[in-house]
Amino acid sequence: MDRWLGLIRSVVIYHNPLRTRAWRRFYREVLEPGNVVFDVGAHVGTRARAMRAAGAKVVAVEPQDLFAGFLRRTLPQDITLIEAALGAAQRQARMAVSSRHPTVSSLQDSFVAQAEDAPGFDHVRWDRQQTVKMTTLDRLITEFGVPQYIKIDVEGYELDVLLGLTQPVEMISVEYLPGFPDLTRAVIDRLSQLGPYRFNPMAGERTAFLWSDWRDAEETTAWLEKLPAKAPSGDLFARLEIP
C-alpha cells in the first residue's frame, strides 16, 4: 500500500498542469526540434514529456520498478524508455528505496546515511532495497548518438553518473541539494574536467534562471557554499562554452 501511495503522491505533485506547461515553455526555448536528449532519473516522466513536446528525441532512463512500470504504461511510444540506472560502469547495484517517498530513492550510500539529519528529510525512511541494472552515459551515446542535453536527477548519485561520460555535451543539468554541498561541488569539478562549462541555477521548481549571466565554476561554487542548508533544492545547468 505504501508503494502505491508513494506513486500517487508523485503523480499528483509532478503532473501538476501548471508545472507541466512551465517546463514545456522552458524546453521550447532551449531545445531545437530533433535534438537528442537524455532524461536520467525520469521519475513519472514530466520532463521527458515536456522535452518531447519541444520536438526532441527523448531517451528516458528510470531504474525504479514502480516508476518504470508507470512509464511503460503512460509514455508516448516515441519516447525510448531504458529501465536501468546510470553510473561509472556496467554492473548491478543496490538502490535504497523509500516506499512512501520514492522520488528520493538513491544509489548513493552516503546521501542516504546523512539525509536523515538533513533539512527536509526528517520524515523520509528508506525501508527496502531494489537490485538495479546499471549502464553508462557513454553506452547510451553509442546507441543513440551524442545528446544536445542531459538532465540528471538521481538523489546524490549525479557524480557517479557523470563518471560514465568521457566527452563534453552541449548542456547538462543536475539536481543540487543545499544540504549536501560537497556532492554538487564534486559534480562541478567533474564537469570542468570534461570541458569549459559555465553555470546557471534554477531554484526549486522554477523554470527561470537565477542569474542573468552564466558563471564559471569558481563563482558557482562560491554561491553554492553560501546557501543555507534549508534553502530549496533546484537544477544547476551547465552550458558548454564554445570558443
Image (spheres, rainbow, N blue to C red):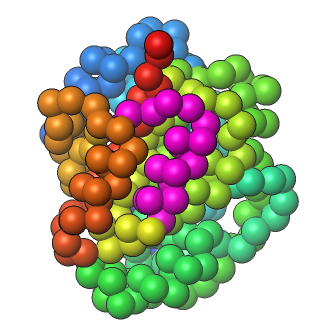
Question: Is residue 190 one of those drawn in magenta?
Answer: yes
Residue drawn at (29%, 65%), measured in percent from left and top? 225
What stretch of residues is rendered in magenta? Answer: 183-199
Q: Is residue 1 visible?
A: no
Residue at the extreme front: 218
- Compared to residue 39, the image places residue 99 above or below, namely below
In the rendered structure, the answer to whether residue 131 lies left or right of residue 207 reads right
Spot occupied by residue 46 in the image (x, y as percentages of width and height): 38, 41
Say whether residue 136 is visible.
Answer: yes
Farthest residue, direction right: 91
Q: Residue at x 21, y 65 (%)?
A: 227
**Residue positioned 29% across, 47% down in the render:** 219
Count how many numbered circles sit on residues in the image.
0
Q: In terms of image quadrants, where is residue 145?
A: top right
Q: Is residue 228 part of the magenta span, yes or no?
A: no
Residue lying at 51% horizontally and 70% vertically, measured from the top left: 105
87 relative to 52 in the view: left or right: right
For the view shown, which residue lies furthest in the top direction? 33
| Residue 57 locus on image (x, y percent) | 55, 19
- Vertical placement of residue 179 versus 25, above or below: below
**x, y (%) of residue 155?**
48, 64
Residue 100 in which image quadrant: bottom left
Identify the image quadrant of residue 107. Answer: bottom right
Q: Nearer the viewer, residue 74 or 52?
A: 52
Q: Is residue 32 above or below residue 40?
A: above
Query: Foreground residue, 42 or 178?
Result: 178
Instruction: Pinpoint residue 150: horizontal percent, then vertical percent.
Output: 52, 35
